[in-house]
Image (spheres, grey):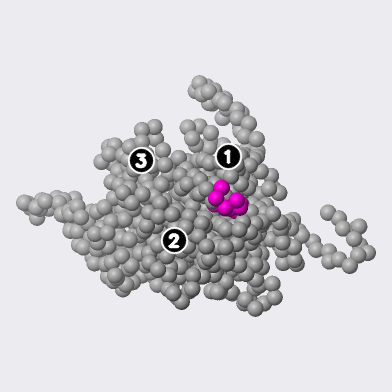
């Protein structure tokens, strides 16, 4: 490697080494201990710096809500170069990111950036326009972004028909300016100066960026999921004769490959998630952490993509799609069963596969949510008693997830095929969520034998700073529930220390408050309060205090609490991503820096959930394994 570029792969020619030595290059030999050296990861679809991390309402510059057609707005003007997301992205090997505005606007502008010593937007631009530095790279003009579909429709109350007209009207305006410019230049080049007397070069700052699209000077990226929208953009490109560099999200591109080949100027690249989909009729993008971009490539490889192509998908291919492929490397080179022969057994050739205990999902509303943003396919949210009295007809009983389970959905079946043999699901709500249930995701319906593992698992509540009422009111309500009498029988079981109370919580300060509440209750009642923190993003900050209090933790992101001996399990929040739980287990293992081994990693999604009471009761044991409790996993 020289100056960040891979110069050669494999056996390095002696002549190359000698050339570098003659140039007084300081050669350093590094033992990579079996690691891979690759080009820097390129994130073709990112919102870092304009969508803040942590997410704050006062620091969001992802979308403008003024109008659907805003080709004069540029993401660099809202780029916070000191955002925490940059370090996360670079920790995952990302060296270049294409920063896109959101998809609320049909038309906007984006930029490509890279890390620099001085964190200013202008200096972080990757080969910025010639007006910044005096160079004249035509391909370096500010790239452009279009968006089709549900986001413009939901914000502006328009349909796909309206979006199509918006695009046509905008390009018609830009085409008139482009044609006038071409006519002006033609007359100047043919020395017809009399025809230009008293005239100025025709331009309009408002439409300049779309004129550049028509001239082929910029790379155009388009947020487009459905075949109908893909068809609309392809028609638009042929009507106004401009190329598209990449379609993003693009969930239905597999349905219309021949259509994509008809795009004017050539077939675009396709920017897809490996697994983030199925939450509505058009998948959207709750931003996937750029740190895990290489994991997306790993999942794509697992499901059949050639390893070299998988690596190219996060390096050279996205770099080329954003017009920066010239700066990168363009090619990648890269038991026996005799003891049981007389027994009544089935001998199976695993062909390199593994057998593991069936995995358990926790945290996702499997069975209650099919297409998240299509209300007719969901259970809906539980009424928050802090917003008003519960309907009297409920009689003070907590809502039960078991009453609305939907079997046979795509999320459930994919989760089952992905190794999930038990799904623990709780109703969704902002405070008193209700009582979870544990069931077999592969069952055809609730009356099938073994469909229900545990009818009523435990009580779930949520304490959050995002609630409509204050945290102190939420904690006060929880205190009253614990110290009160009567109520649901599962709540009474929690008071007696026979069932676990699961609290969805992110913030360390609120966790401290709940630890104090646990001490207060146990001192008052003389009973143990079995408490589990779910999600628990900041639990690692209080790892020692959590261990001392005997509280368990179900995390979705961090493994730091393990180092202090906290009883930890992992959960997956999104129902469409549960099928990839085994990948999450693998990532936790690989990123633990030796804190856990393979057996401990599997326990995070199996036995640990049972021992902390997430399978009902106080925990301390695993239910008896049945024939459905083990899964084959192909390598």
Residue drawn at x 41%, y 47% is: 54
Please tell me whether mark 3 or mark 1 is closer to you in this view: 1
Q: In the displayed structure, would residue 252 be above or below residue 301?
A: below
Q: In the displayed structure, would residue 193 be above or below residue 278?
A: above
Residue drawn at x 33%, y 45% is: 79
Q: Is residue 308 left or right of residue 195?
A: right
Can you see residue 493? yes
Decide which of 565, 301 is in the foreground and name it: 565
User: Mark 2 sits on what residue?
Assistant: 430
Can you see residue 329? no
Secondary structure beneath dot 1 equals helix
Residue 449 pos. (x, y %): 70, 75
Marks 3 and 1, the one that precedes in the sequence: 3
User: Mark 1 sits on what residue?
Assistant: 544
Decide which of 228, 418 is in the foreground and name it: 418
Q: Is residue 131 left or right of residue 28?
A: left
In the image, the segment drawn in magenta is: 523-533
Q: Residue furthest left?
A: 198
Q: Is residue 291 left or right of residue 149?
A: right
Question: Could you classify mark 3 by the number of other residues whose Cα lies within 10 Å: few (under 14), some (14-19), or many (20 or more)?
Answer: many
Residue 74 pos. (x, y %): 29, 50
User: Mark 3 sits on what residue?
Assistant: 81
CA gap between label 2 and label 1 equals 28 Å
CA gap between label 3 and label 1 equals 35 Å
């Amino acid at each position: 490697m020289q100056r960040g570029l891979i110069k050669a792969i494999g056996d390095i020619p002696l002549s190359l080494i000698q050339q570098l030595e003659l140039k007084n290059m300081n050669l350093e030999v590094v033992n990579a201990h079996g690691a891979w050296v690759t080009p820097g990861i390129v994130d073709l679809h990112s919102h870092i710096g304009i969508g803040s991390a942590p997410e704050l309402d006062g620091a969001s510059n992802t979308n403008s809500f003024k109008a659907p057609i805003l080709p004069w707005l540029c993401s660099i003007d809202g780029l916070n170069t000191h955002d925490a997301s940059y370090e996360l992205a670079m920790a995952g090997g990302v060296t270049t990111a294409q920063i896109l505005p959101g998809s609320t606007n049909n038309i906007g502008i984006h930029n490509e950036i890279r890390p620099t010593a001085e964190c200013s937007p202008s200096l972080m631009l990757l080969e910025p326009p010639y007006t910044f530095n005096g160079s004249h790279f035509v391909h370096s003009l500010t790239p452009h972004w279009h968006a089709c579909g549900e986001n413009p429709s939901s914000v502006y109350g328009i349909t796909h028909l309206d979006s199509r007209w918006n695009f046509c009207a905008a390009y018609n305006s830009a085409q008139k300016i482009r044609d006038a410019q071409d006519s002006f230049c033609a007359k100047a080049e043919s020395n017809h100066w009399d025809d230009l007397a008293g005239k100025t070069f025709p331009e309009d700052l408002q439409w300049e960026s779309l004129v550049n699209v028509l001239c082929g000077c910029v790379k155009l990226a388009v947020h487009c999921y459905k075949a109908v929208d893909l068809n609309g953009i392809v028609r638009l490109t042929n009507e106004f004769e401009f190329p598209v560099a990449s379609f993003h999200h693009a969930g239905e591109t597999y349905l219309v490959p021949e259509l994509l080949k008809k795009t004017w100027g050539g077939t675009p690249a396709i920017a897809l998630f490996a697994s983030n989909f199925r939450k509505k009729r058009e998948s959207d993008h709750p931003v996937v952490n750029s740190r895990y971009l290489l994991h997306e490539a790993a999942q794509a490889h697992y499901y059949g993509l050639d390893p070299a192509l998988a690596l190219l998908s996060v390096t050279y291919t996205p770099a080329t799609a954003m017009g920066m492929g010239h700066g990168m490397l363009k090619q990648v080179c890269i038991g026996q069963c005799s003891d049981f022969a007389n027994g009544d057994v089935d001998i199976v050739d695993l062909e390199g596969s593994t057998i593991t205990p069936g995995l358990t999902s926790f945290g996702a509303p499997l069975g209650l949510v099919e297409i998240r943003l299509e209300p007719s396919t969901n259970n809906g949210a539980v009424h928050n008693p802090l917003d008003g009295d519960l309907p009297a007809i409920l009689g003070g009983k907590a809502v039960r997830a078991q009453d609305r389970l939907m079997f046979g959905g795509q999320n459930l079946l994919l989760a089952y095929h992905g190794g999930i043999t038990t799904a623990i699901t709780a109703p969704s709500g902002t405070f008193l969520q209700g009582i979870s249930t544990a069931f077999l995701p592969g069952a055809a319906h609730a009356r099938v034998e073994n469909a229900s593992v545990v009818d009523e698992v435990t009580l779930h509540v949520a304490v959050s700073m995002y609630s409509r009422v204050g945290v102190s009111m939420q904690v006060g309500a929880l205190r009253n529930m614990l110290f009160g009498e009567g109520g649901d029988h599962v709540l009474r079981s929690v008071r007696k220390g026979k069932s676990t109370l699961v609290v969805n919580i992110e913030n360390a300060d609120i966790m401290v408050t709940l630890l104090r509440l646990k001490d207060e209750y146990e001192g008052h009642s003389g009973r143990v309060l079995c408490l589990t923190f779910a999600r628990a993003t900041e639990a690692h900050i209080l790892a020692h205090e959590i261990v001392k209090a005997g509280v368990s933790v179900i995390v979705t992101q961090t493994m730091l609490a393990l180092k202090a001996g906290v009883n930890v399990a992992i959960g997956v929040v999104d129902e469409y991503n549960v099928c990839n739980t085994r990948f999450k287990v693998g990532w936790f293992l690989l990123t633990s820096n030796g804190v856990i081994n393979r057996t401990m990693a599997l326990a995070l999604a199996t036995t640990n959930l049972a021992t902390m009471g997430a399978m009902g009761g106080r925990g301390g044991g695993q239910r008896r394994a049945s024939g459905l409790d083990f899964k084959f996993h192909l390598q």
